[in-house]
Amino acid sequence: MIPRYSRPEMTAIWSPETKFRIWFEIEAHACDAQAELGVIPKENAAAVWRAKDAQFDAARIDEIEAVTKHDVIAFLTHLGEIIGQDAARFVHQGMTSSDVLDTAFNIQLTRAADLLLADLDALLAALERRAMEHKFTVCIGRSHGIHAEPVTMGLKFARFHAEFARARARLEAARAEVATGAISGAVGTFANIDPAVEAHVCAQLGLQPEPISTQVIPRDRHAMFFATLAVIASSVENVATEIRHLQRTEVLEAEEFFSKGQKGSSAMPHKRNPVLTENLTGLARMVRSMALPAMENVALWHERDISHSSVERNIGPDATVTLDFALARLTGVIDRLVVYPEAMTANMERLSGLVHSQRVLLALTQKGVSREDAYAMVQRSAMKVWQEGRDFRTELGADPEVAAALSPAELEANFDLDYHTRHVETIFARVFGAG
């Protein structure tokens, strides 16, 4: 985790203090369940909770681990130092390290998912607000980067809103899939621990018991989780790329907010660069890069190995922290994005009406002209606009074949800009609902 791209609430989920607190709660709840089953004395289970308000010493645990070479044993040894060795005698009864590690990791992932869902809610609200604001702000749509037909800026925002609504649904599903816990002991057979212990611990910590866990929770769940984060990051880049294009000097239909005192270049005082969306493009690459290692973690040897462990110690914090930061940054960009309707109009008019070529084509076919002939007639005038800077409407009106099929009034009717926005309300109702 790089502090520059981190926010405190998400970072806290991955702190050693939080991790050890979760480990403690797993062990303490397991002791309660064992006591109810009569496996350990109730007074021992109660004594474990004496550490409820304790501050676990990460440095001390590291010191013990330097000797034991085992992180869970180091933690359990430190817990014994806090509550006393007699009280700690039955802690971890019948359990294996992965019971603690995997269950805790999934708790951290579900907490991270909750923050990311809140991030998505904020982004969706910003996109909806800007979509409504610019519902009928007409601009040129582009395909292959070339002028196509008119759209509205509101439709751009609405499209991204729909994309992130899908992202939110995927993340909810991924959260549910990873919200499992396992307290099943060595190789997952419950030979030394009753399944009721797992049920109790999971219920206390907001998880579902893993149906079958070998000695680890199956990593296909985690692969889906990180793949979902990667898809969300790709959507972040999708929006960022659109804004970066719109801010190009030759386009300049929208730009990131440029604050007082901000500098765009160390050398050129005039520069106003899309630095935030460029940054988002880079962060998206990082989040996506963590999906593949998560998928490679699915294939483990037999009932358990730890080849996944070092991967998850990296990608768990890094993917969630980075995406949290990126979503918050994108929300800020959308909230403060400066839109230039006049530039949109000027850009649309640069090609002297070419954006209406399809309407003229269709109007000719309605008059009995074959589609192939109509295409050739319209294209002939269009090429003069591209190559000689002519006016499209004038060229069409001067074409004898076009004039034979369409009266001046009929030709003029095909240059109505409002025609292209007549179904905007229908699209908005699909995205945001009626009302």
Image (tube, rainbow, N blue to C red):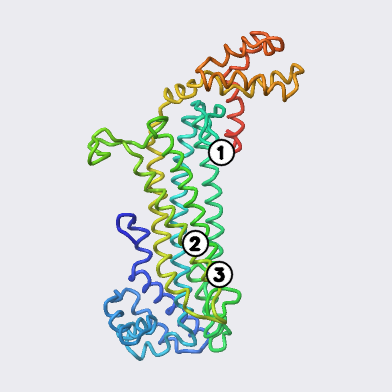
Name the front one of labels 3 and 2. 2
412 to the left or right of 20:
right
Which residue in the rendered view is the most extreme toward the front? 387
- Taking depth in this image into account, of 152 and 179 the one nearest to the observer is 152
Mark 2 residue element: helix
The 10 Å Cα crowd at callout 3, few under 14, some 14 to 19, many 20 or more, is some
Image quadrant in which the C terminus is located = top right
Mark 1 residue element: helix
In the figure, residue 331 lies in which quadrant?
A: top left
Residue 9 percent location from the top left of the image: 35, 58
Give the spatial CA distance, label 3 vs label 2. Answer: 24 Å
Residue 369 bears which disc, if any?
A: none
Q: Earlier in the sequence, mark 2 or mark 1?
A: 2
The 10 Å Cα crowd at callout 1, few under 14, some 14 to 19, many 20 or more, is some
Q: Residue at label 3?
A: 208
Q: Earlier in the sequence, mark 1 or mark 3?
A: 3
- Taking depth in this image into account, of 215 and 197 the one nearest to the observer is 215
Q: Is residue 364 above or below residue 166?
A: above
In the figure, residue 10 lies in which quadrant?
A: bottom left
The residue type indicated by label 1 comes to: Phe
The residue type indicated by label 2 comes to: Ala
Q: Residue at label 2?
A: 291
The 10 Å Cα crowd at callout 2, few under 14, some 14 to 19, many 20 or more, is many
Give the spatial CA distance, label 1 vs label 3. Answer: 33 Å
Q: Is residue 159 above or below residue 290?
A: above
